[in-house]
Image (spheres, grey):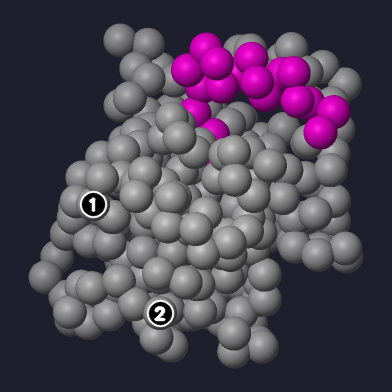
Amino acid sequence: MSTPRAIVLRAPGTNCDEETVAAWERAGAEAETVHVDRLLERPKSLDAFGILTLPGGFSYGDDLGAGRILATRLGALDEALRRFHDRGGLILGICNGFQVLVKAGLLPGPSRATITQNDSGRFECRWVRLVRSPGARSPFLPDDAPMELPVAHGEGKFVAESADALEALDRSGQLALRYADEHGLPTESYPANPNGAPRGVAGVVDPTGRIFGLMPHPERFIEFIQHPRWTRLHPRPEGDGLRIFRGAVDAIR
């Protein structure tokens, strides 16, 4: 059984790359951090990997808006990214990486969307409950079990170009991950939904399910003891976030 290779793409301002590498390695992949400039110099080097990750942080300081500059730079990698995706490669964008994927047009797909400022008007840093949407299909979401993950963002509200477009994404299962209330139901209510995203959208997939972006940080809950209430909860062998990484690894072994 071969070991999948994951590339973690970083840029000035990225600050979650090391945690993301650790998560891929814990899930059974071989992971490598690569600066975007190196990939721009040698786009074909992407062919050596099965998983591409855009981690969290503040790429290029988010000076022109969250993820916008890095999204623009990815435009020069369009052919390499298309080839990567067409041969079955998986792409994961976490927080700032999700913002990049949306603003680069890689998510959600044919319809347009953006990620904008939280309704609260401030940076939100908290733990949230999450549920997979019925009908969602993605290697990154291998089961229906709910999860808890931390969020840390000021611009996390996913907004589609129209109400009809949002409905179409929902029907197709692309609104794959939702913020949930204490009863496990998708919610638009604050603070369970930290940014006010319509229909409680926390994560989105492309039509193939092989590109996945989410605002919460799965790499920050790999070990059970990373949960702030771990001493009060029933012990678990691992953190909820590891399921996302392991699902992708298992899918391409």
Q: Name above or below for residue 68 compared with residue 25.
A: below
Task: Identify residue for label 1.
Answer: 134
Q: Is residue 10 magenta?
A: no
Q: What residue type is labelled 2?
A: Glu
Left or right? Give the position of 35 relative to 100.
right
The x, y position of residue 190, in whole percent, is 43, 88
Residue plotted at (37% across, 20% down): 252
Closer to the chain start, of discs 2 and 1, is 1
Q: What residue type is labelled 1?
A: Pro
Q: Residues within 10 Å of mark 1 (few under 14, many from 20)?
A: some
Q: How many labels does the image show?
A: 2
Left or right? Give the position of 165 relative to 74.
left
> What are the residue bounds of the magenta stretch?
75-93
The x, y position of residue 187, in whole percent, is 34, 77
Residue plotted at (67% across, 76% down): 117
Residue plotted at (46% across, 43% down): 205
Q: If the image is split into quadrants, where does the N terminus sit?
A: top left
Helix, strand or loop at label 2? It is: loop
Q: How far apart are marks 2 and 1 (CA)?
A: 17 Å
Whether residues under marks 2 and 1 lie with C-beta atoms below 8 angstroms apart, the answer is no
Quick one: 189 or 191, which is closer to the camera?
189
Residue that protrudes farthest toward the left in the picture: 234
Task: Identify residue for label 2.
Answer: 188
The x, y position of residue 171, in whole percent, is 34, 50
* Among the 4 quarters of the image, the one containing residue 115: bottom right
Q: Is residue 83 magenta?
A: yes
Quick one: 49 or 236, which is closer to the camera?
49
